[in-house]
Amino acid sequence: MDSAAVELCGRFPLAWCSAPEDDLAFAAVMGDNLIFLKALLLLDGDGPAKGDDEQESLPALHTKVDLLLLMMSRGLRGLEPLSEPVHCCIDAQWLRWQGQPAGTPPSSAGPVALALFLRPSLAIPLILPGTLLEEPPGTGGNWSGRCAHRLSGTVQECLDRLIFRHHRRSVARSRENP
């Protein structure tokens, strides 16, 4: 499989990180991922409509506060400089990339995790735990690596919405500029 029907491609900082070791660590990573993806959906959206009442805008405010707290906690722990961007494509099942992610690649065939910075200005990564896959010979493409990511259901749903939103905007732009 060289390209998916709906995917998000671009040049993003990408780095190896430690895979969650147990269910509790996985849940914590998915919690941070969920806050980050909801914030991206909110930031990429059109904002609240004029007819929205207070109850409808309250979850958006909570998401912004959660993102702010997440950014502050990352700042207190000390942020490392982001790696050089590499060409990446992410879809509902896979993350593929050209080049080398920053950091030390895992030495075993066990679980891995990659930190994908979809919005480098926020300096918060989407952590993608998963399994590295080798490209079978003759599958085409010039990808350096491919990872089957494993996310919680709610995080996967938010990622799918974000990817679809970017796809829809890309299609709209291509129609505007033939």
Image: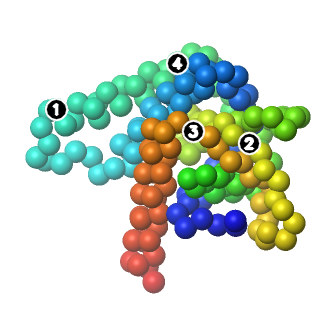
The kind of residue on which mark 1 rests is Gln
If you read the primary sequence from the N terminus, does the residue marked by circle 2 or circle 1 appear first?
1
State which mark lies toward you, 3 or 1: 3
- In the image, which disc is placed on residue 131? 2
Horizontal side of 127 relative to 72 (left or right) equals right
Query: How far is the residue under mark 2 from the one under mark 1?
Result: 41 Å
Q: Which residue is mark 4?
A: 73
Query: Please, which residue is most extreme toward the bottom here?
Result: 178
The residue beneath circle 3 is 151
Q: CA distance from mark 1 to mark 4?
A: 28 Å
Q: Which mark's residue is nearer the viewer, 4 or 3?
A: 3
Q: Secondary structure at mark 2?
A: strand
* Mark 1: secondary structure: helix
Residue holding disc 1: 55
Q: For marks 4 and 2, give the one nearer the viewer.
A: 2
The residue depicted at 70 percent of the width and 22 percent of the height is 21
**Mark before the other along the chain sequence, 1 or 4:** 1
Residue 157 sits in quarter: top left
Marked residue nearer the N-terminal end (3 or 1): 1
Q: Amino acid at mark 2?
A: Thr
4 or 2: tag closer to the N-terminus: 4
Label 3 CA crowd tier, 10 Å (few <14, some 14–19, many 20+): many
- Residue 71 is left or right of residue 147, and the answer is left
Vertical order, 64 against 172 (above or below) = above
Disc number lying in front (2 or 1): 2
- Residue for point 75% across, 36% down: 112
**Residue located at (55% from left, 60% from top):** 7
Q: Position of residue 154 (x, y in %)?
A: 45, 38
